Image: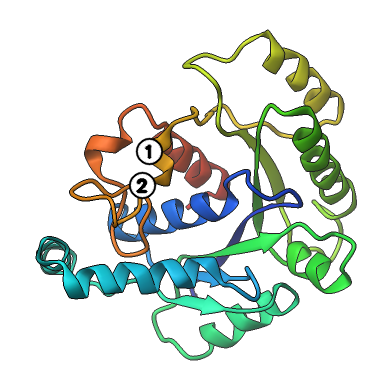
Amino acid sequence: MEKQTLYVAFSTQKGGVGKTAFTVLSASYLHYVKGKNVAVVDCDFPQHSINAMRKRDAEQIGTDEFYKRMAYEQFKALNKKTYPILCSKPEHAVQTADDYLQTVDDKPDVIFFDLPGTVGNAGVLKSIANMDYIFTPIIADRIVLESCLSFADAVHKNLVGKNDIRLKSLSLFWNKVDGREKTDLYERFEKAIDELDLPLMKTFIPDTKKYNKEMSDKRTVFRSTLFPADKRLIKGSNLEELIEEILETIKL
């Protein structure tokens, strides 16, 4: 039986909530740590920010002996190439992934999509409908949250579990949580989420500058397309917990 590649997207209609960061972090962790084969479709047209990150990462390896040695040691240990990043317009995302799968014998376990949440665009809506799973980061800002919940509610009501629609679930998770524990404010927001009958993941991501650290930050890398998050930085980030909950959700 041929392997079924899962299509997974971090998506919301509001920018600045972390969907691109979580796309990279999840792809790199699954590919370089968990032993899964992944690919990424970068739909951030026209700047293609994940592909631009890959170029920055490669330049760092080419000019910095520390990172060059780090890349060599990783390749020797894993004996696997870096995951491919495919550039696409949002409305062509699924076709881009489908075409890629026709060119490779060893199909990825999962393809991550960095999708916008422009539900008013029919092409983007079709891409969203053809995901297997969507994960939507949310933050405790009323305006941002209202926008994210509007997107999530529309997708959940109109697409999830419908006949001839591929999308199996949409899950929310808290990002940039202020302090180690959630406050009463989150309880009020979560009541609204519950009233909309939207799934909320158990894991929340604390507000920490770790999530901004790229390869240009010497010795400790958190967000990279070529390396997984540094073990020294993972502690307290809840990244591992989030990814384990994602794996449980998508049954991978």
In this rendering, the answer to whether 48 lies above or below 134 is below
Residue ranking furthest to the bottom: 103
Residue at x 81%, y 60% (from the top left corner) = 118
Residue 228 picture location, percent across and down: 30, 53
Residue at x 53%, y 85% (from the top left corner) = 100
Is residue 67 rendered to the left or right of residue 207? left
Residue 196 picture location, percent across and down: 86, 30
Q: Which of these two is toward me, 216 or 119? A: 216
Categorize mark 2 by other alpha carbons within 10 Å: few (<14), some (14-19), many (20+).
Answer: some
Residue 137 picture location, percent across and down: 63, 41
Categorize mark 1 by other alpha carbons within 10 Å: few (<14), some (14-19), many (20+).
Answer: some
Q: Amino acid at mark 2?
A: Lys
Q: Which of these two is toward me, 185 or 166? A: 185
Residue at x 78%, y 63% (from the top left corner) = 129
Q: Amino acid at mark 1?
A: Lys
Task: Tell me if label 2 and label 1 are in contact, CB under 8 Å.
Answer: yes
Pointer 2: what residue?
213
Q: Which of these two is toward me, 231 or 56? A: 56
Whether residue 4 is visible:
no
Whether residue 35 is visible:
yes
* Residue 87, quarter of the rendered image: bottom right
Q: Colour scheme used in the picture?
A: rainbow
Q: Secondary structure at mark 2?
A: loop
Q: Secondary structure at mark 1?
A: helix
Is residue 55 rendered to the left or right of residue 7? left
In this rendering, the answer to whether 6 lies above or below 30 is below
Distance in Å between CA atoms under marks 2 and 1? 6 Å
Is residue 198 rendered to the left or right of residue 25? right
Pointer 1: what residue?
210
